[in-house]
């Protein structure tokens, strides 16, 4: 975290963009903690709210787009060869493949909120030959919601943002499971309503 805070202190808004590009591609950067820390800087008055969100969204969108392009150009062999170096294990890839097959584009939106999944969804979208327009609609929407949520959270928590860092690190797995459960319930409800309209 010290390196990330130094990056933001020395490079300001540009540092947010660089850190998030690296984090989305797969470098070991605690993205949610970074975004919450940015929100804390907004709370402290060291950064402005809207520019912080815009820079965060820019970094997330550039990172996710690079991942998509790599998926299109290099395909599965890239993930197999370089995945472990980017902390993308074969287990994560297989798990995300199953989620992607079930939820499709929806995963590009919610995948941002699932550590270990957001790094892979764009690769899979590229590998599965999604059109850029379809990819951009869902992925960029997810980036906007994700960045705004965590920067705002840091701003609201203020001095207590460090508690979020602790609890997120400790309970992130349970939060992910709860989030996935909620998404599954919502998806089933939406699907049933859609089926009722058809018949």
Image: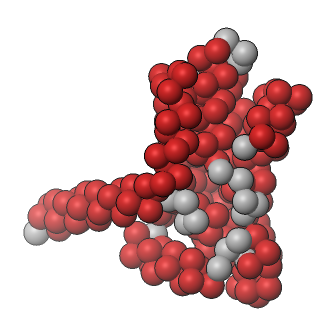
Figure coloring? secondary structure
Number of marks in the rendered image: 0
Measured as percent of width and height from the top left, residue 80 is found at 73, 86
Measured as percent of width and height from the top left, residue 109 is found at 49, 54
Q: Using the image, determine if residue 164 lies above or below residue 170.
A: above
Q: Using the image, determine if residue 120 lies above or below residue 165.
A: below
Quadrant, the N terminus:
top right
Q: Is residue 32 left or right of residue 7?
A: left
Measured as percent of width and height from the top left, residue 22 is found at 78, 54
Query: Which quadrant of the view contains residue 122?
Result: bottom right
Q: Residue at x 10, y 69 (%)?
A: 199
Q: Nearer the viewer, residue 174 or 61?
A: 174
Outermost residue, right side: 10
Q: Nearer the viewer, residue 71 or 169?
A: 169
Residue 198 in sight here: no
Query: Which quadrant of the view contains residue 3?
Result: top right
Residue 115 in sight here: yes
Measured as percent of width and height from the top left, residue 17 is found at 77, 40
Q: Residue at x 71, y 71 (%)?
A: 87
Query: Which quadrant of the view contains residue 182?
Result: bottom left
Q: Using the image, determine if residue 67 lies above or below residue 170.
A: below
Q: Residue at x 52, y 75 (%)?
A: 96
Q: Using the image, determine if residue 6 lies above or below residue 116.
A: above
């Amino acid at each position: 975290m010290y390196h990330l805070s130094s990056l933001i202190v020395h490079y300001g808004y540009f540092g947010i963009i660089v850190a998030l590009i690296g984090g989305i591609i797969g470098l070991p950067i605690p993205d949610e903690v970074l975004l919450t820390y940015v929100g804390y800087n907004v709370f402290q008055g060291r950064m402005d709210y809207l520019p912080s969100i815009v820079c965060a969204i820019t970094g997330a969108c550039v990172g996710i787009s690079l991942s998509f392009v790599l998926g299109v150009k290099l395909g599965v062999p890239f993930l197999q060869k370089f995945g472990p170096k980017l902390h993308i294990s074969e287990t994560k890839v297989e798990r995300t493949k199953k989620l992607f097959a079930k939820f499709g584009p929806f995963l590009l939106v919610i995948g941002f909120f699932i550590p270990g999944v957001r790094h892979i969804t764009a690769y899979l979208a590229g590998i599965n030959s999604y059109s850029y327009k379809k990819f951009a609609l869902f992925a960029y929407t997810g980036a906007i919601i994700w960045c705004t949520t965590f920067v705002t959270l840091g701003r609201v928590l203020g001095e207590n943002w460090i508690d979020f860092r602790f609890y997120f690190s400790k309970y992130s797995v349970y939060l992910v499971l709860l989030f996935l459960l909620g998404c599954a319930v919502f998806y089933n409800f939406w699907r049933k309503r859609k089926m009722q309209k058809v018949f």
